């Protein structure tokens, strides 16, 4: 009811489609998104766009679900949100957020969670809990894994909106383009990110998130085992052989 899932060529597009509520992440909306990402994860799609209809990308959590709720209910809502974020990073396909408008709080968390993000120059990003009564603690987890401490804390403490170019400079999005080029540049980046072996890419994405917060020694120990094991798959052998034979690889 609140999203659209479409397939075209090698890619799936999941579109948040509740513009009247500024694509607020109600419990129902998050469950629908999670289900869609799981379906795409099991499909033959090579990459995924996360997009939105209406003037706002996502306004974050829907407070209509939350006002007056007890502690148990609030934990459930936030756990559903965390499951959504984890699902985006667990599926093997690269996920690209195509951000055309404002993304705030858990909406900003969505952007920070996606593997890649392209923003329109009209987009903006904020964690408004810093100037309200409920700090953006769970969005903080994703945002602080994208940008440095001082910048993350500036966003979190002030609650101010940063523009798209600042978001790119800080590392929250990959690049910023004029609105009329958003579709084209998003397509170009996802095509580049999905070329090559699908299985190798899926292993690599999983390994990235597994090692990124480990101490360097443990990260290398983990990465050695993954890379050694991955060398045994047919696509890895084909890639090496094709390089030596100066020909284009034929991946399975």
Image (spheres, rainbow, N blue to C red):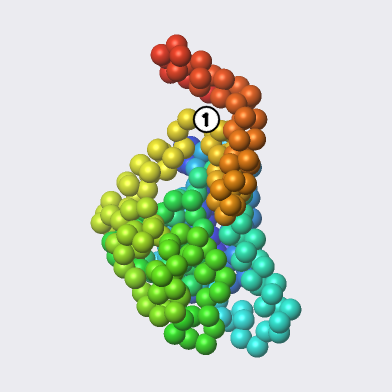
Q: Quadrant of residue 246?
A: top left
The residue most toward the front is 217
Q: Position of residue 163 (x, y in %)?
A: 31, 68
Relative to 41, is 213 above or below?
below
Residue at image location 61% in from the left, 79% down from the top: 65
Quarter the N terminus occupies: bottom right
Q: Is residue 129 in sight in this rendering?
A: yes
Residue at image location 55% in from the left, 51% down from the top: 212
Relative to 196, is 159 above or below?
below
Residue at image location 65% in from the left, 61% down from the top: 83
Q: Is residue 19 in sight in this rendering?
A: no
Quarter the C terminus occupies: top right
Q: Position of residue 185 (x, y in %)?
A: 33, 47
The residue most toward the right is 72
Relative to 17, is 77 above or below?
below
Label 1 neighbour load within 10 Å: few <14, some 14-19, many 20+: some
Of 41 and 211, which appears nearest the observer? 211
Relative to 107, is 180 above or below?
above
Is label 1 in a helix, a strand or a loop?
Answer: loop
Q: Position of residue 22 (x, y in %)?
A: 45, 72
Residue at image location 43% in from the left, 63% down from the top: 148
Q: Which residue is mark 1?
A: 197
**Count of numbered circles in the view:** 1
The residue most toward the top is 245
Of 66 and 224, which appears nearest the observer? 224
Q: Indicate left or right for 123 with 35 as reference.
A: left
């Amino acid at each position: 009811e609140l999203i659209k899932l479409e397939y075209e060529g090698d890619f799936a597009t999941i579109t948040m489609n509740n513009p009247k509520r500024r694509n607020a992440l109600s419990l129902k909306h998050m469950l629908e998104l999670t289900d869609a990402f799981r379906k795409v994860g099991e499909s033959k799609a090579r990459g995924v766009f996360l997009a939105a209809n209406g003037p706002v990308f996502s306004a974050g959590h829907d407070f209509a679900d939350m006002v007056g709720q007890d502690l148990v209910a609030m934990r459930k809502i936030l756990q559903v949100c965390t499951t959504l974020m984890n699902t985006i990073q667990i599926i093997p396909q690269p996920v690209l957020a195509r951000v055309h408008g404002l993304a705030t709080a858990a909406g900003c968390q969505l952007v920070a969670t996606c593997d890649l993000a392209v923003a329109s120059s009209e987009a903006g990003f904020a964690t408004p809990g810093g100037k309200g009564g409920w700090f953006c603690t769970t969005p903080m987890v994703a945002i602080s894994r994208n940008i440095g401490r001082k910048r993350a804390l500036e966003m979190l403490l002030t609650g101010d909106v940063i523009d798209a170019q600042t978001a790119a400079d800080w590392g929250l999005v990959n690049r910023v383009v004029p609105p009329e080029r958003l579709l084209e540049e998003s397509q170009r980046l996802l095509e580049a990110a999905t070329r090559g072996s699908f299985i190798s890419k899926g292993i690599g994405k999983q390994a990235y998130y597994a090692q990124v917060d480990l101490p360097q020694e443990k990260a290398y120990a983990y990465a050695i085992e993954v890379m050694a094991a991955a060398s045994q798959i047919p696509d890895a052998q084909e890639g090496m052989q094709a390089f030596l034979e100066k020909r284009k690889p034929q991946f399975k």
